[in-house]
Amino acid sequence: MSAPPEAANSRYDYLIVGAGFAGSVLAERLASQHGARVLLIDRRPHVGGNAYDEPNEAGILYHKYGPHIFHTNSEQVRDYLSQFTEWRPYEHRVRAMVRDKLVPIPINRTTLNELFGLDLKTDEEAADYLASRAEPVDDIKTSEDVVINAVGRELYELFFQGYTRKQWGLDPSELDKQVTSRIPTRTNTDDRYFTDSFQAMPLHGYTKMFEKMLDHPLIEVRTGVDFAELKPRAHELADHIIYSGPIDEYFDFRFGRLPYRSLKFDHQTLDEERHQPVAVVNYPDPQVPYTRVSEYKHLTGQDAPVTTITYEYPSAEGDPYYPIPRPENQALYKRYEALADSTEGVAFVGRLATYRYYNMDQIVGQALAAFRRIDEKRKRHRPQPIAVAAE
């Protein structure tokens, strides 16, 4: 690493905190479109945020922070990222280990047939079967309500209750309905996890994509730098600050800490070509300590005699990953949001700065929208040429 940023001889136009999707997209746009000098910092020793991937000692490209699957319905987001990567077509499939069977998740007609020994042949038959099991809930408020209303208590307990308790450290009855609303129930046999129009993986990995995105003479990247060390002098370094870190941390936890769930990863390389039939297998059983096992060769298409897998263990401690969706947490965030809105010269973007769980394409879309706002403001304040009357 070169000299610390505070030793720089000249000011930057922007100091961007966090080199994940939000910060990197804004750094690229501001440098390439506005000719802005950007200092991009990250406390981790690499760019890419949680999407960072790297080859391990066995040469397997693995995701250090768990599997990241790219999917989007936004042509704008797809076209933007396509400037920095080629794509490998990939449709994500997940299985759940339930009653010693590997069955498709989200629940579909195949799941029902395999789990209950049925012979449902049409969407209508599957819909009728689910309706016969559903237990209508008049006022849907929690994640438990969502699932029981749709598929009944048995499927709720088999697929959702144990997994959710492990993932969030809370029962679904204690969580906002949005948690399980994200997971559809299907009556057809489509076993893809996502149904977006564009599903693919960066051909050479996420890190290579980020490196190409940030390869601009006006962008200076400093990793291993904690914003807390620069904060007292931040406005001496740059005219504007874009912050994508935890919003409560920016304000020194003035109102208390925003609750998050974290993850711990156990990466293992096995002496076998393939370990499981799909990239991810979920383990809803509460007696199994991990939530899922991921195998990266499904994602990358690599050909190798060994394979790398990752066990994921949810945790209350560690890096912030998932905002916990409860009304009291959202109320606490709103207090920080009001503080952010009244803070001059700082823009807050990204998952952690807005305390929301976004998919990768949503973060890219948010960053592109933030750039458009900056661009429009810049155009409004650009000096207009003075018309000189001809003599």
Image (cartoon, rainbow, N blue to C red):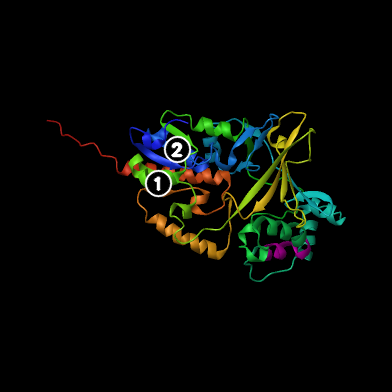
Which of disc 1 and disc 2 is earlier in sequence?
2
Across the whole image, how many numbered discs are drawn on residues? Answer: 2
Left or right: 114 as drawn, with respect to 339: right
Residue 254 visible, this orientation: yes
The foreground one among 94 and 323 is 323
Left or right: 338 as drawn, with respect to 64: left
Residue 311 in the image, given as x and y percentages of width and height: 71, 45
Tell me which amino acid carries mark 1.
Lys
The foreground one among 288 and 355 is 288
Tell me which amino acid carries mark 2.
Leu
Task: Give the spatial CA distance, label 2 vs label 1.
Answer: 14 Å
Q: In the figure, residue 74 lies in which quadrant?
A: top right
Mark 2 lies on residue: 40
Left or right: 10 as drawn, with respect to 88: left
Residue 185 in the image, given as x and y percentages of width and height: 71, 55
Q: Is residue 153 magenta?
A: yes
Q: Which residues are magenta?
A: 144-154
Q: Is residue 277 magenta?
A: no
Mark 1 lies on residue: 231
